[in-house]
Amino acid sequence: MSRYMTPLPGMLAAAIEFVLGQAASLDPDPAAKLEPLEGRWLKFALEGLQIDLWLSAEGERFRVLAEPEEESLEADTEISGSPGGLLAMALPAFGTGSGVRIEGDARLAQQFQQAVKALDPDLEKGLIDYFGELLGPQMYRIATEALAFAGQTATTGGDQVSRWLREESRFVPDPDEWRDFRDGVDGLREAVDRLESRIRRRQA
């Protein structure tokens, strides 16, 4: 059972994997660039959001998960920091990942940065291709504004970025909003089940 109450972590992991996958597909030899990451795992801990992202490589593609496939899996390297700081580290074009802490194999973190830099993913195009013409530009705006906000409040920690994401960008749902949405979905599912039962009884 997932430890997350919202689909956000899974969506975030899938979007990042898609963007990195696009970049790898355009490279003439992605396997050579991803070889140092093959079978090894980096864990990115997004402070303030309580979200972890697990990243590895398999052949010519990245793998990005919101949760490890096996509970016993241990990361070779754990990188923690604000969402903005981690995004800046992963995409060097956005600046430097200030305030990021690395535990474990620091060399692996460096190799990850080198691989992403060599592949040079187009974040804006990737998000538009993944989320569509309407939502994609908004996702890119949120990412760039979060980075700018993180840079302005570097000394206040991840909680400030988390608050901005929830209150200003509206990307992260408020817990009460999520519970209302979840209860609404459950209520709708129960209503559909009752309707199907009535139809089956009448047809019997």
Image (cartoon, rainbow, N blue to C red):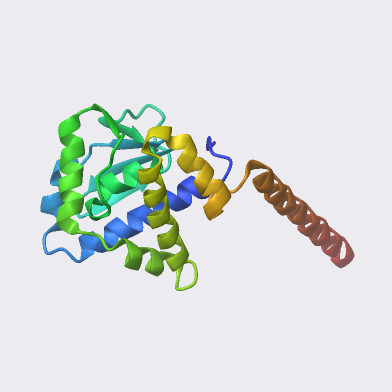
Residue displayed at 38% across by 33% down? 155
Q: Quadrant of the C terminus?
A: bottom right
**Nearer the observer, 147 or 179:** 147
Up-down relation of residue 140 to residue 42 (above or below): below
Q: Quadrant of the N terminus?
A: top right
Which of the 4 image quadrants contains residue 119? Answer: bottom left
Residue that appears at 67% across and 48% down: 177
Residue 48 can be seen in this image: no
Residue at point 34%, 33% (across, down): 80
As rendered, which of 162 and 23 lies closer to the eye?
162
Q: Quick check: 166 left or right of 142?
A: right
Residue 142 lies in quadrant:
bottom left
Percent position of residue 29, x then y: 11, 59
Coordinates of residue 19 in the picture (x, y in percent):
32, 59
In this view of the protein, which residue sits in the foreground, 110 or 145? 145
Number of disc labels = 0
Residue 57 showing in the rendered view: yes
Give percent across and percent down for residue 123.
32, 61
Residue 138 % position (x, y): 47, 64
Q: Residue at the right extreme?
A: 202
